[in-house]
């Protein structure tokens, strides 16, 4: 399997380095937002990966409920954990940008409020898991919770910010359906999205492997 | 040195840190996995 090889990890290292250099040296500053717009190359991929991770967590949970196989619970848990990290990163990068543009780290803008609620929802997922000791019950309940939590994701990420007036710059998926971005910016942006996605799958794989080893060792100790 | 180069250097350093940490973790997991597989083989042979 290609993921077992090492070469793609070094390629990712180089790719991400080129994305960082491109973000600061190749892409021009955006009209109206100036140099601060460069945060788009890091903020949007983290938000995208948070959504993707929560989707994977929900699919894993659904599969667990169908099959009762432990591996799907590991998938769901690992994806939710990495998704929460990326959601925090999206919040932090957005907040840094807000400080520069809106003169305040936090303004309770609809986007900020919705990601805050989303963070709380997924933080509760981990609270739920840590509150239950029986493994099967923990996996079953958290699977149900993860599916319900994911139902709110499109609502908080795509619907609320569009229903209420927001100061947030026009997202790429806008009502006009057109990408308002300079060609060089778009090139860096697409590369950023793809390299971040590859990084996410690497992190997910490492997390799943760690969990599998942990379970194996736990089982051998309890024998 | 302008601010943008400072931010660029910080980003490169953060990425370097994350990348080498993940690489280290990857190698570590491979080693642990091999050790577990080896000890499992050994115990199954003993039986």
Image (cartoon, coloured by chain):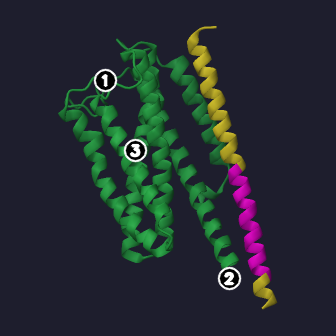
Chain colours: A green, B yellow
Q: Is residue B35 above or below residue A200?
A: below
Q: Which residue carries the number 2 mark? A: A223
Q: Is residue A133 left or right of residue B13?
A: left
- Residue B31 appearing in the image: yes
Q: Secondary structure at mark 3?
A: helix
Q: Is residue B22 above or below residue A71?
A: above
> Which chain is home to disc 1?
A
Q: Is residue A43 left or right of residue B47?
A: left
Name of the residue lying farthest toward the front: A131
Q: Secondary structure at mark 2?
A: loop
> Which image quadrant is residue B9 in?
top right
Count of numbered tags:
3
Q: Are marks 2 and 1 in contact (CB under 8 Å)?
A: no
Crowdedness near tag 2: few (<14), some (14–19) or many (≥20) residues, C-alpha within 10 Å: few
**Residue beneath the point at 56% across and 27% down:** A20
Which quadrant does the C terminus of chain A fall into?
A: bottom right
- Residue A40 appearing in the image: no
Q: Nearer the viewer, mark 2 or mark 1?
A: 2
> Quick one: label 1 or label 3, which is nearer the N terminus?
3
> Which image quadrant is residue A36 in?
top left
Q: Is residue A183 left or right of residue A207?
A: left
Q: CA distance from mark 1 to mark 3?
A: 21 Å
Mark identifier at residue A169:
1
> Which chain is home to disc 2?
A
* Position in image of residue A131 (x %, y %): 47, 63
Looking at the rendering, the stretch of residues picked out in magenta corresponds to B25-42
Mark identifier at residue A119:
3
Marks 2, 1 in one chain: yes
Crowdedness near tag 1: few (<14), some (14–19) or many (≥20) residues, C-alpha within 10 Å: few
């Amino acid at each position: 399997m290609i993921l077992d090889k090492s070469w793609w990890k070094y390629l990712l290292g180089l790719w991400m380095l080129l994305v960082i250099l491109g973000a600061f040296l190749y892409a021009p500053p955006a009209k109206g937002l100036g140099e601060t717009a460069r945060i788009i190359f890091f903020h949007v991929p983290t938000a995208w990966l948070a959504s993707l991770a929560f989707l994977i967590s929900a699919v894993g949970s659904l599969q667990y409920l169908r099959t009762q196989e432990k591996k799907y619970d590991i998938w769901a848990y690992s994806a939710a954990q990495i998704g929460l990290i990326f959601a925090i990163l999206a919040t932090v990068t957005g907040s840094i940008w807000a400080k520069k543009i809106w003169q305040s780290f936090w303004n309770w803008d609809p986007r900020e409020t919705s990601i805050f609620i989303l963070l709380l929802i997924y933080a509760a997922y981990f609270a739920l898991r840590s509150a239950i000791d029986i493994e099967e019950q923990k996996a079953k309940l958290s699977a149900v919770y993860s599916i319900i939590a994911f139902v709110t994701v499109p609502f908080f990420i795509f619907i609320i910010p569009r229903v209420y007036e927001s100061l947030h710059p026009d997202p790429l998926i806008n009502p006009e359906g057109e990408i308002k971005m300079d060609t060089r910016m778009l090139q860096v942006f697409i590369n950023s999205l793809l390299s971040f996605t590859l990084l996410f799958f690497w992190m997910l794989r490492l997390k799943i492997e760690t969990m599998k080893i942990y379970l194996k060792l736990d089982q051998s100790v309890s024998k | 040195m302008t601010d943008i180069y400072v931010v660029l250097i910080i980003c490169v350093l953060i990425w370097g840190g994350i990348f080498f940490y993940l690489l280290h973790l990857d190698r570590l997991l491979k080693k642990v996995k091999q050790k577990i597989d080896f000890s499992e083989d050994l115990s199954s042979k003993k039986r």
